[in-house]
Image (tube, rainbow, N blue to C red):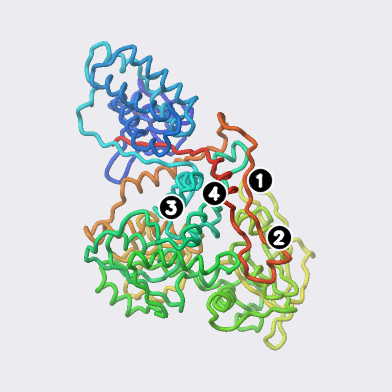
Amino acid sequence: MSKVYFSTWNGELINNISKPEDEWEESAYNLPAQYDDHRDSKAFIGWDGVALFDKNVDVIRLAMEYAAQYQEYSEACGRCAPGRWGGQILYDQLDKIARGEGSIADMDHLKEIGKSMKVTSKCEIGKTVPNPILDLMTYFEDTFMECINEQKKSKHYDDEIGYIAKITSPCSDACPADVDIPGYIEGVRDLRMDNSLKATRQTMPLAHVCGRVCPHPCEDACRRSNLDEPISIMSLKRLGADWETDHKFDFFHPKEKKPSNGKRVAIIGAGPAGLTAAYYLAADGVEIDVYEELPVLGGEVAVGVPEYRMPIDKYNQDIECVKDMGVNFIINFKVKPDDMRKFEEEYDAVMVATGTRISKKVRCDNENPELDGYWSSIEMLDQINLWDKYGIGSPVDLTGKTVVCVGGGFTSMDVVRCSIRAGAKKVIMIYRRDEKTIIRNTTYEEYHEAVEEGVEFIFHSAVNKIIDEDGVIKSLDFDMFELVPDPDGGRAKLVLIEGAGFNMEVDYLIPAVSQSADLKLLPQEWELDMTSWGTIQTNGKDYMTSRKGIFAAGDCEYGPMTIVNAVGQARRAASVMSRYIHTGEITLSDDEIMEDHLKKLKVYNKKEKITGWMPGVLRQHSEVIDVDIRKTNNKEVNLGFTQEEAMSEAERCMRCYYIAMVAT
């Protein structure tokens, strides 16, 4: 809810112009009435309307400045005359009126051009920029006519006013790393894979990884799904990275590395969060040392995500891209409290990005990690991946064994599919909720590929008791539940079905319900604030801990999360740290502040009716290795798009860029 003076946002007309402020009606939307801790917003203007928070706003200049923003962003396309020239006309005419030289004919011309752009522009940035401008001309026509009739400047035309703009899109807004998704899709469409890759690496250095093992929340917010099917966004992301690797090009960095500025940062952990922070800090000229406990780089993606999902040679290229920025890595280094004390003294800032590598228990009777057959998911995946990818340790052979995994997320999917490949006779996943929820927790593809490979899923179930003989697991007792709807509309509750339980003989029980963080590296006297989940507490915006100069990002800050979430956190943390080590202050950039506002507001409208595009152009599906071939080896399952498929899929993108702007 936001208190507004006037608003047309998303069709919600609120007009408090003639009312005293204490009687103002509030908007139902999370409009950015307060820009940051130090500044209130005077107005917010964007693709879906305008909101005024201050009755003294110069509406003519507001419209003019918004039209000016279009000039900065529209040339990314420039494929149609209305989009290419219409925006310039909007600005010129509005500026003419605002400086006191306009005419009634200019008003008519503005309306005509605005309406034409809405109908004939090819992309959303051209279709939507006129929306708030036409709203202002409609509801504040008297203000416009006063400047025209009296040939006077708009009331704040010559004043210093802050106008802060950001370009966004529904898919980018839904992406935790805020990747310029239309930008990299456009690169694929034009067969400019270098441009595609640079667009990705602006906020996501791990292009190989997030083009393969991302849960792609962006696709849930794709406007194309309002018309037919969402774009295959994730599959298009990997193309630029694969093109760079397969052709053995030098790395296409989105910006040139700055000269060294003499500042030093230590990063603990070389997983996705640590790699991301290192990349962007190094690009800013900071000297980076990354300390990693494992004998290999890459964190859980390296030792947790199987080869058939994330080929290590591809991931290593992402790591080499980070190294190419001049990052220094130290492996086989388990950081201890004394090291942290030393780092605090020697470095200008420290980031903890250690992940969560302690498997949690399933919480059943007779649960004992020392039992033969009780195998934590982290230990199991470590052994499999260290052997399969690096030849370290020994192989895992489950021939003839029955494996039960308790879980419902990506880790449990990796466990059961690896068990199939290790020769297990029977592989079962136990999950307390339903098929729909497990798909939402992972992906449609991941679940159905597991089913094809022979994994059995028992839903609405839980392990009640482990039965062992002389310390060896022999069987498990299971409970069965039913989902009972909440009469108050909340989440359905699991209710035990009496007498429905059963027993099953098993060889292995592998818990994959969640993981916790090992934070013994933190000196006790630091007394860092912790969350109730046993992770490091920050405010979730700048990633500074309760101790000045110590930052945290990724799983150790939030708990087990997706790779793209960890990358998004680390990118923001690196940006904040880059300013902090020079000024000693914690600040967010305007782009980051706007990013937070837009995520609260929600850019994607699931109920929007899409017009002006040809429906029924169904999405491309990349080739997947046949199940009888893939389940006996570690070949990459998803082969990706051919050039023709990629271009066809990229053509489906509606290029849904929007512009948002705040006046402060």
Q: Nearer the viewer, mark 1 or mark 2?
A: 2
Q: Residues within 10 Å of mark 1 (few under 14, many from 20)?
A: few
Mark 1: which amino acid? Pro
Find the distance from the CA under tag 4 to the CA under tag 1: 38 Å
- Find residue 601 and report its horizontal and vertical position in percent: 45, 40
**Residue displayed at 61% across by 55% down:** 443
Mark 2: which amino acid? His
508 versus 166 height, above or below: below
Q: Nearer the viewer, mark 4 or mark 1?
A: 4
**Disc sitting over residue 460 in the figure:** 2
Residue 494 can be seen, yes or no: yes
**Disc sitting over residue 194 in the figure:** 3
- Confirm or deny contact between disc 3 and disc 4 (CB under 8 A): no
- Find residue 471 and report its horizontal and vertical position in percent: 67, 86
Name the residue at the bottom extreme: 470
Would you name the residue on which mark 1 appears?
Answer: 487
Quadrant assignment, res 149: top left
**Disc sitting over residue 233 in the figure:** 4
Find the distance from the CA under tag 3 to the CA under tag 1: 54 Å
- Confirm or deny contact between disc 3 and disc 1 (CB under 8 A): no
- Find residue 37 and report its horizontal and vertical position in percent: 30, 46
